[in-house]
Image: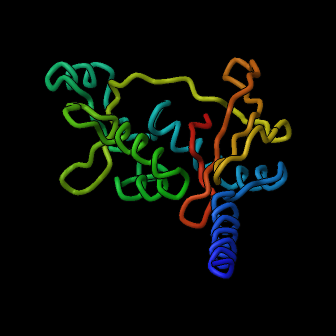
Amino acid sequence: MKKTAGIILVVVMFVSSFFLVSCRGQSLTVDEAVDILSLLLPDARELTVAIYGEGLPYYHDYSEDELEEMFRRTGTLYIPVASNAAFTSRRAMEEAINATFSERMVRIFTADAFGHIGQIHPRYRENEQGWLMINLRRDIWPVMQEIHLDTLEVISTRRSVVTTYVYASRENGERIQIEIALVYENGRWVLNSLAY
């Protein structure tokens, strides 16, 4: 009986220690977080501007009157993005979203870019040739101009999620403190929040 209890105790201790180590997850120092964000933030900003801000550059061979007539006729205004735009296809934009953001944020960004169920006029759609088209009649959100990584503080680390505070500048120069979350998913760190 004592031998069986001893074996059970050893097994419980082994399983408990394994569980504690595996649940602890990943954590980051301030320097590591700065390094990772330095790599992720340029793409995050580009995607945020494309989806929520001014959008991708587009061909603009139309007069304002022609644009108004197109809008009046169709109720929307889709124009092909320029050939020098960061993304010229849905696939290219989705690949960038997947490389930068967590699975949770990928669902949000993809839905906001290409439409929710029942949404009639999403920000982007592809034409018959697979070229990305931008909806010019979409609300534009202000996007942060710069994130000051030299002000970064790691606030918490829980189960492979690191929460940071950092100062960012708005277009008018005002500096505000924002929260940026990183998550360790599929063997890499990605953004788990909006950054801009």
Q: Between residues 186 and 57, which one lies in front from this camera angle?
A: 186
Q: Residue at x 37, y 40 (%)?
A: 113
Q: Residue at x 83, y 48 (%)?
A: 30
The N terminus, quarter of image:
bottom right
Residue with the most extreme front position? 1
Q: Between residues 99 and 126, which one lies in front from this camera angle?
A: 99
Rendered view: 55 above or below 157: above
32 relative to 136 in the view: left or right: right
Q: Residue at x 39, y 53 (%)?
A: 88
Give the number of marks. 0
Q: Position of residue 93 (x, y in %)?
A: 42, 52
Residue with the most extreme bottom position? 3
Q: Between residues 6 and 89, which one lies in front from this camera angle?
A: 6
Location of residue 136 by image quarter: top left
20 relative to 167 in the view: left or right: left
Q: Position of residue 94 (x, y in %)?
A: 41, 54
Q: Residue at x 29, y 34 (%)?
A: 122
151 relative to 146 in the view: left or right: right
Q: How is the image coloured?
A: rainbow
The C terminus, quarter of image:
top right
Location of residue 109 by image quarter: top left
Q: Position of residue 161 (x, y in %)?
A: 64, 48
Rendered view: 155 above or below 30: above
Rendered view: 132 above or below 136: below
Q: Position of residue 177 (x, y in %)?
A: 74, 25
